[in-house]
Image (cartoon, rainbow, N blue to C red):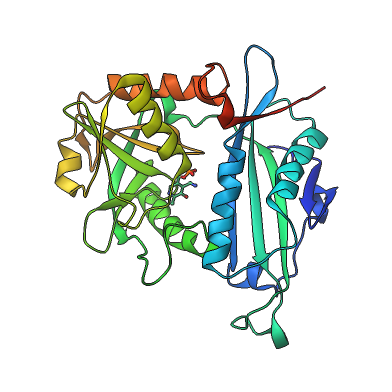
Amino acid sequence: TQAAPRYAWLNGKIVPWDDCVLHGRTQGAFWGANVFEGIRAYRCSQDRQLHVFRLDDHLARLGRSMKSVRMDIAYSVAELHEACLELVRANEFQEEVHLCVVAYFGMGRNFDPLSHTGETGVHITAVPMPRSEGYRTGVAACVSSWRRISDDTMPPRIKAGANYQNSRLAHQEAVRNGFDTTLILNQWGRIAEAPGANVIMVRDRKLVTPPGTSGVLEGITLDSVLRLAQDEVGLTIEKRDIDRTEAYVADELFLCGTLAEILPVVTLDRLVIGTGVPGPITRHLQHLYERAVRAAGVDYRDWVTTISVR
Ligand code: PMP
């Protein structure tokens, strides 16, 4: 287990890591009544600075999540932006980091977890985050026996903490059964997404991904990858339903997300996808994404916020 970072950020202040605590009776802690963002900062090999990837796009999505659950917080986007940078600087990270910004509901009237409360707060943590092991080799996935939450029960398009009970159930079942990850079908039996990443299939040099109405998060990595694929490689994008068996016969299949980055899926339900190794389009997109997040290419500089570290 790795050592905890020195500092966290809680309601306007940098605090010692161990002081970033909520009361167990807050709605955020008790029923998972929160919305959040997961954000990554990469180190550029040339200037050694840390670059936060699409910080303001993540904070904009946090705003959409807050709107959907009717939450107001005391901090502006500019203040949260600055808080993220301040926290990373304070911790003097040598490694690449993952930031988690959480906006939560407090105690509520008479401690009632169903009551609407204007008492809200925000905490931010940042921890070192190495790249996942499967990035080079690819991962083994199964189709989950759990269905993805649907917009008429819990809104999958936003990042609400409570949504992740669905992700946990699916992920842990997959791992218990000997897989690395899983694809979760939506209420119509079509492929939605992985527990923490969107899905893209390659067929006949086209990138296919489920539409935004199919029970998926509005992924920022997905948006980045689709833009790179269109602008840099000239690939056609199709947003349409994907059947389970169409994924079986895909040329290439990969996940994309802040943590997953671009993660090749080389088997699905023990069937070999493509040639059983990460495919050429997946590899090419990994390379382009890598350049973009490390601010190595000029064209996507507006995607990164540079933190000057001493
Ligand atoms: N779907 C789910 C369920 C996720 O948790 C994530 C990770 N945030 C994604 C997709 C990918 O989103 P992003 O690229 O914005 O991290």
Picture quadrant of residue 50: top right
| In this picture, residue 153 sits left or right of residue 93 | left
Q: Nearer the viewer, residue 55 or 202?
A: 55
| In this picture, residue 274 sits left or right of residue 71 | left
Q: In which quarter of the image is the N terminus?
A: top right
Give x and y (percent) for residue 293.
Answer: 54, 26
Give x and y (percent) for residue 20.
Answer: 78, 55
Whether residue 16 is visible, yes or no, is yes
Give the mark count.
0
Give x and y (percent) for residue 270.
Answer: 22, 39
x 81%, y 41%: residue: 6
Whether residue 278 is visible, yes or no, is no
Above or below, 5 relative to 24 = above
Picture quadrant of residue 268: top left
Q: Nearer the viewer, residue 177 or 292?
A: 292
Picture quadrant of residue 296: top right
Q: In which quarter of the image is the C terminus?
A: top right
x 58%, y 72%: residue: 31
| In this picture, residue 24 sits left or right of residue 214 | right
x 58%, y 21%: residue: 295
Above or below, 280 relative to 72 = above
x 36%, y 29%: residue: 138
Q: Which of 294 and 149 is in front in this view?
A: 294
| In this picture, residue 124 sits left or right of residue 265 | right
Give x and y (percent) for residue 246.
Answer: 15, 42
